[in-house]
């Protein structure tokens, strides 16, 4: 399995029209639920009079996502969020949020028409957005002495690892996100330094 996966390079908006209903699709990269909440709040502020603001997201590597969710926002169950998520999964993209804002045009589309319209709107941005690759990250919890913290931070900086949090008691507890291709290097470093570690994958 690849140690890298595609994510959106940035944000993009596309608009389509189906039987006088406007579907405004927006794609954005996201790292966590806080990003999702922020972007949804921005969409609601920008389109306060929209009939529906439906969405789906997937965080992590496609096919083995850490988290995924969807919302129909008042549309009939399964006609909006599910088709949006289905297109995301089909496009094999991770760390991605797709929001589709609908302005009702006065003509009912029916369940099948809604599914096609929301899937088509999602497709319009997922196909057009530029992609970049991101390394698969492995979470690790490390227990170390105060004196070992600085060498660990230096190692992390040299290996594109992210120090998520540090807690202090009789020693330090560090939560680290490590690119999968540097995991063995971390194990060797911890063993050489006498640092206790635990993988969270």
Image (cartoon, rainbow, N blue to C red):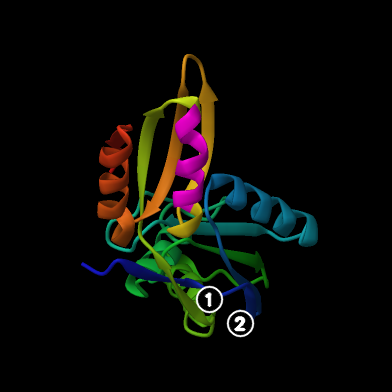
Magenta stretch: includes residue 172: no
Q: Where is residue 44 in the image (x, y as percent from the top left)?
A: 73, 54
Q: Can residue 129 be seen by looking at this rendering?
A: yes
The disc placed on residue 121 is: 1
Decide: is 58 above or below 148.
below
Q: In which quarter of the image is residue 29?
A: bottom right
How far apart are the two marked residues, 2 and 1, measured between alpha carbons? Answer: 7 Å
The disc placed on residue 16 is: 2
Judging depth in this view, the residue of 128 and 169 nearest the camera is 169
Q: Which residue lies furthest to the bottom in this view?
A: 128
| In this rendering, position of residue 38 left or right of residue 111 | right
- Give the class, few, some or many, for how many residues have Cα within 10 Å of label 2's Cα (few <14, many ≥20): some
Q: Where is residue 104 in the image (x, y as percent from the top left)?
A: 66, 67
Q: Residue at x 73, y 56 (%)?
A: 42
Q: Can you say which quadrant of the picture contains the N terminus?
A: bottom left
Dominant SS type (magenta): helix
Q: Which residue is drawn at 79% across and 55% down?
A: 45
Q: Quadrant of residue 144?
A: top left
């Amino acid at each position: 399995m690849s140690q890298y996966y595609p994510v959106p390079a940035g944000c993009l908006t596309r608009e389509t029209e189906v039987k006088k209903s406007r579907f405004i699709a927006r794609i954005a990269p996201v790292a966590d639920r806080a990003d999702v909440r922020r972007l949804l709040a921005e969409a609601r502020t920008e389109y306060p009079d929209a009939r529906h603001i439906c969405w789906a997201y997937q965080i992590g590597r496609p096919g083995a996502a850490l988290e995924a969710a969807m919302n129909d926002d008042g549309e009939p169950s399964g006609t909006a969020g599910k088709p949006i998520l289905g297109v995301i999964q089909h496009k094999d993209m991770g760390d991605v949020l797709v929001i589709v804002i609908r302005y009702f045009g006065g003509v009912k589309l029916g369940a099948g028409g809604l599914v096609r319209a929301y899937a088509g709107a999602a497709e319009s941005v997922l196909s057009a957005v530029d992609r970049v690759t991101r390394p698969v990250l492995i979470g690790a919890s490390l227990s170390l002495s105060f004196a070992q913290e600085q060498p660990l931070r230096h190692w992390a900086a040299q290996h594109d690892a992210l120090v998520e949090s540090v807690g202090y008691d009789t020693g330090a507890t560090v939560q680290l996100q490590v690119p999968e291709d540097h995991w063995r290097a971390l194990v060797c470093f911890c063993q050489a330094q006498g640092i206790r570690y635990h993988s969270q994958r």
